[in-house]
Image (cartoon, rainbow, N blue to C red):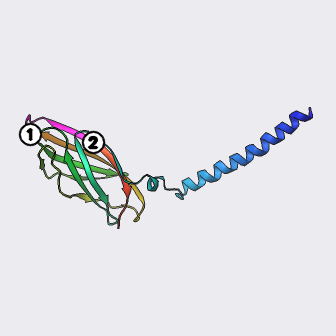
Amino acid sequence: MKKAQAGLDFLMTYGWALLLIVLIVGALFALGIFDVGSFLGSRSSGFAQVGIVGWKVADAGTFTTMFENHAGNDISITSISATKGSETINYTTPISLANGQSTGTITIGTFSTPGASGSSYTVAIDLIYTDTATGFEYSDSGTVTGAVTP
């Protein structure tokens, strides 16, 4: 009987201690003390045919990008939309790209709430392009993450 009581006391003491640690760490994450995005750095994912070479969200809200054609044929990008949180900005000026060619810096638009300098962001990008050889229209999408720059 005494051995079971000692084991139960041991489990209860350590159980409450672990529960308290989990609650404290959870509260710190909820308060934004640990910004997971700042540990990831800049990265992109998705983008099968039209690659993204570079991107930046400035603390003034300006979102700029550079794209590269990986489609195998010449293309014309006809529409770009970028979504950060619940805000979407659109760019509709056509951009012609030869196979393997990169664009210059393109200012997609300005987000009204970019975040503080150094804070992390994630932007979902959807673009529509036309294969100039066939005339068919395609779409490509992906996400980019990084830190807001001054």
- Span of residues in magenta: 132-141
Vertical order, 79 against 111 (above or below): above
> From the viewer's perspective, is 78 left or right of 23?
left
> From the viewer's perspective, is 30 left or right of 134?
right
Which residue is drawn at the image coordinates 31% and 43% (left, top)?
A: 142
Q: Pinpoint residue 81: horizontal percent, then vertical percent.
A: 25, 49
> From the viewer's perspective, is 7 left or right of 71?
right
- The image quarter containing residue 31 is bottom right
Q: Amino acid at mark 2?
A: Phe
Marks 2 & 1, CB-CB < 8 Å contact: no
Which residue is drawn at the image coordinates 15% and 46% (left, top)?
A: 78
User: What mark, if any, has residue 47 been given in the picture?
Assistant: 2
Q: Pinpoint residue 118: horizontal percent, then vertical percent.
A: 41, 63
Q: Which residue is mark 1?
A: 132
Q: Amino acid at mark 1?
A: Thr
Mark sitting earlier along the chain (2/1): 2
* Of the pair 68 and 31, the residue shown nearer to us: 68
Q: Pinpoint residue 73: horizontal percent, then vertical percent.
A: 12, 38
The 10 Å Cα crowd at callout 1, few under 14, some 14 to 19, many 20 or more, is some
Q: How many marks?
A: 2
Image quadrant holding the N terminus, namely top right
The 10 Å Cα crowd at callout 2, few under 14, some 14 to 19, many 20 or more, is some
Vertical order, 2 against 82 (above or below): above
Image quadrant holding the C terminus, namely bottom left
Q: Pinpoint residue 69: horizontal percent, then vertical percent.
A: 18, 44
Mark 2 and mark 1: Cα distance apart in space: 19 Å
